Amino acid sequence: MTQLKTLTAMALALSATMAQAESHMTEVSFGTNWLAQAEHGGFYQSVADGTYEECGLKVTIQPGGPQVNNRALLLAGKIDYHMGGDLLQAFNAVKEGVPVVSVAAVMQKHPQVILAHPGKASTFEDLKNLTLLIGDNGYQSYYQWMIAQYGFTPEQREPYTFNPGPFLADEDKGMQGYLSSEPYLVEKEGGFTPDVFLIADAGYSTYATTIETMADTIASKPEEVKCFVDGSIKGWYNYLYGDHSAADEMIMTDNPEMTQDKIDYAIEKMLSEGIVDSGDAETMGIGAMTAEKVEDFFTKMVDAGVIEDSIDWQAAFTTDYVNQKVGMDLKK
């Protein structure tokens, strides 16, 4: 009986300790910009393996999607952090006077690609010989840069409706895509491996999958921001180079249409193409940002007529929380 009482007392004490630890956690929410996928894996990893909790954060991931605008929720104070798309969004926020700041850049390369049938284009410039299926957002952003930088024309562009059928049926067409999506889809539905051209390798130098938060959060909660950024960076190292099975399970739970083979394909592409861990990230750590690269992209967008040169591009980001080699020892 005495032993039973002792075990009961120990269990109650442990439960109390855990409850106390839980009560000291700061709850924060992170909104992604699309449905759960491998390209969000590092964030899920840090939730799954407790990395965020190590510095006192209890993080909830709120997936985005076609009917979800998590960026608007960030502006309304409904979530604490948001996954930005690329630097154009950040520049436009400055233009509109919205105090959103990018505090880290997970992807050193934008995973936007253009696909071609095998043998139809040997180089990026060869794509000028094809009719290109490009969506409206792409036409207003990176395609304007392609026109200014390489001499592509508005006339060779046809609207992309996110249906690969026209591309599959015509060898003289190219098609926009996302590195881990459309090439995979073409292989499955078309039965061939397309030639894939990453626009980042052609000079489209924006960061992608940024971490955004409000300027007020940075001013009032700098330690929380540091914890979230550091935890996210460590999560990305563990996701890319370690056991990511628990994170994958969370991703597939949040997005039932996601499958393990799609996740594995995406991870392989992120690694082989250096989407996350390349360039400055190789020496400064994942999440790296530099003023030089931001200015370079800003200048290209001004030259392409996408944005105005009067925008204070330096207000769009801060490097206070990156470039510190956090988590590099986790790379295996």
Image (cartoon, rainbow, N blue to C red):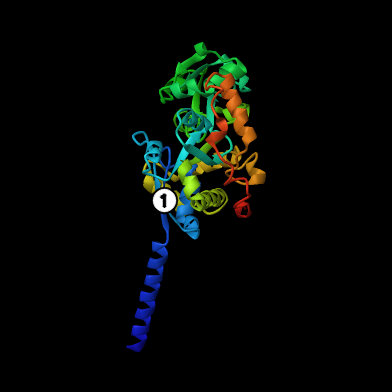
**Residue 54: image location, x then y, percent:** 50, 60
Q: Quadrant of the N terminus?
A: bottom left
Q: Residue furthest top?
A: 155
Residue at 35% x, 88% y is: 2
Q: Is residue 13 above or below residue 100?
A: below
Q: Is residue 154 above or below residue 275?
A: above
Residue at left offset 50%, top offset 25%: 176
Looking at the image, residue 17 lies above or below residue 88: below
Residue 288 percent coordinates (x, y): 60, 42
Q: Is residue 219 visible?
A: yes
Viewer-side residue, 11 vs 161: 11
Residue that appears at 39% across and 62% down: 23
Compared across the picture, whether 75 is left or right of 219 comes to left
Residue of label 1: 28
Occupied quadrant, residue 107 = top right
Rendered image quadrant of residue 74: top left
Question: In the depicted view, which residue is nearer to us: 48 or 74?
Answer: 74
Q: Is residue 210 visible?
A: no
Q: Is label 1 in a helix, a strand or a loop?
A: strand
Taking 178 as reference, is 253 left or right?
Answer: left
List x then y, in percent, for residue 142: 53, 24
- The extreme left residue here reads 1
Q: Does 213 appear above or below 312?
A: below
Residue farthest along the bottom direction in this orientation: 2
Amino acid type, callout 1? Val
**Within-10-Å neighbours for mark 1: few <14, some 14–19, many 20+:** some
Q: Position of residue 294 (x, y in %)?
A: 60, 33
* Between 89 and 4, the one nearer to me in the picture: 89
Q: How many numbered marks have been drawn onto this rendered protein structure?
A: 1
